[in-house]
Amino acid sequence: MQNLIQTDQRGIGVTFSDPQEASIVLWAPLATHVSVKVYGQSSAIPLKRDELGHWCLKTSQLQPQDLYTFVLDGDNDFPDPASLCQPQGVHGPSQAIDIRSFSWTDEGWVNPALDAYLMYEIHTGTFTPEGTFEGIETKLDYLKSLGVNAIELMPVAQFSDSRNWGYDGVYPYAVQNTYGGASGLQHLIDSCHAKGIAVVLDIVYNHFGPEGNYLPEFGPYLTGKYCTPWGQAVNFDDAWCDGVRRYVVENALMWFRDFHVDALRLDAVHAIKDFSPVHILQEIRQQVDQLMDSTGRSYHLIVENDLNDPRFINPLTEQGYGMDAQWTDEFHHALRVTAGEEKQGYYTDFEPITDLAKAYTDAYVYDGQFSAERHKIFGQKAENNPGRQFIVFSQNHDQVGNRKGGERTSQLFSYDMLRLLAGAVMVSPYVPMLFMGEEWGETSPFYYFVSHTEPELVEAVREGRKKEFASFHSDGDVPDPQSNETFEKTKLKWEHLQEESHQTLLRYYQTLIALRRQLPALHRLERKQLAVFPDPDKQTLLLHRWHEDQAVLCLMNFASQSQSVSLPIDADGWQKIVDSADPQWQPRSGTSSAPDVVSGTDSITLQPESFIIYANRYDQSSFNLPDPISPELYLS
């Protein structure tokens, strides 16, 4: 199968290497006759069967912008499974477009190394009032001023109607038409690169969405061999799996090659079922490596993985799957429980302070212990995996949107705790990620929402959400995911930034991000050069990190009262460089009592829910504190 894939161009669907001639490749292994119906023409054009169930045609009768469908066995016609454009939605005809005709201006762009990423997760439909790629472009200067150099877009593959998280996409190659389509995404990415911002795209290979999913009409894209939360599994290792594997690998290559995406985030890879000799993730890695060789550019592969198995992020040379990094939910869970999150659902497995300390040192909290929530011994150690392979956060779309009320951190914790949580993420030896709006303490919820057009499916989604929260976050009603009101309430309210408290929190985030970039002990993600000192009784945690002769000491008090701590190292002459209880950050009460300079192993009083960083070899005059973000950048 691999010899069918050419990394320099897309090998399935409709392509235009010659503007006057379309090349068509369709996988339909069980069909006996296939033709393409071009709208406006009197008769369908037959395709010729090729190897492994692919049907092919070169024709001048299909031109860019033409609408078309495929007719199977002279009977029903369906949109193209590899459609690049669905202008009339998931049930309408496909539209032929030439995505390689876009005029790129990013020839000099260099994708940063993962350990230099400061990530920011965005849902296109709710990030701006417009809910489009063009809307995101209006905020790029704002993100740049914040210190973000990588945005992560939640999935943009075509889904039904206009409202969806994106994980219900049914055309993995088509960019959502209501967001701006393929050209809109290309323009956004080109603009991001001009601003020095990388683009991470969230993609879904563990299932296909429900509405408008005509893939089974073309072939065995799914298999009953395994059961997943979404029903039958994507067919990666059963009969006729080669065509499905090619479909997925070609898709990954397309985003890098034709859209200039810098990294892919593969959703819930623990739900991918594949016992082939070469796992589908390994094959994607191999093909992406070949693409990097041919383009001279670097591309990152990031996974969401709930298995605590370093095999996924170990290199191919060590029999791993070769993924560059993974989201690390356990850091989030330990941090939230430490901050006071109620221990229910998946939080029941985590202990405050001690598990957060383990997350700092070991990445995985569960790496061979018994998990009461899972009722089994769970996880393996990730001792040799560098810090750049773990992405951490205090909130993300899943952890917010999968609460019944969609509450953001700002709705659950005090203003003081928000600053402490931000500091705890920024001083980790891992890659930090923010969820849109958290940097100013956005108070609008982030609900789960859909806009299906099939009544039975709508009702099934509603009932599914109710069952999901039967024993977790059980108070109150579940917001109707189909309601437009639910969607509108979820949109960011940029006007909140006119309020002083939100502006102040934004400046605090700016300061932390700038500090992380400028102190070697923080921006060098060296997991071995770290020591942590937890005190569960006092609810304090002290983190010591260093690089060569530069070091920091981070003091965290998660208690609701002041706590006295003794410095665990000799920090004689170290300077205080950030203190969340400083009056400039609007502390809850009083002023910080922590000294500006510490001597030896001084005892220091930490204010309630506060965060302090001391550093050696720190020249305040050389610290480039960013200017406050201009209101024009967020109120435009």
Image (cartoon, rainbow, N blue to C red):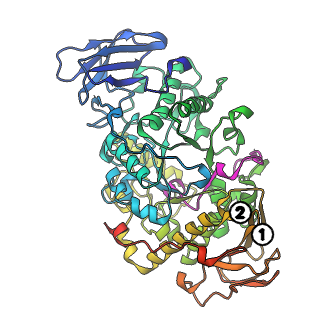
Q: Which residue is mark 1?
A: 534
Q: Nearer the viewer, residue 4 or 27?
A: 4
Quadrant (top left/top right/bottom left/bottom right) for the C terminus: bottom left
Q: Residue at x 40, y 62 (%)?
A: 141
Query: Counting residues from the N terminus, which is met first, the one under dot 1 or under dot 2?
Result: 2
Spot occupied by residue 456 in the image (x, y as percentages of width and height): 36, 40
Q: Which residue is mark 2?
A: 356
Q: Is residue 594 above or below residue 332?
A: below
Q: Nearer the viewer, residue 225 or 495?
A: 495
Is-magenta flag for residue 374? yes
Mark 1 belongs to which amino acid? Pro
Pointer 1 with pointer 2, Cβ within 8 A: yes
Q: Residue at x 54, y 17 (%)?
A: 3
Tell me which corner region of the image, top left, top right, bottom left or bottom right, holds residue 517: bottom right
Q: Residue at x 60, y 74 (%)?
A: 622
What secondary structure is marked by label 1? strand
Residue 200 visible in the current orientation: yes
Task: Give the residues drawn in magenta, as a range.
Answer: 373-402
What secondary structure is marked by label 2? helix
Q: Residues within 10 Å of mark 1 (few under 14, many from 20)?
A: some
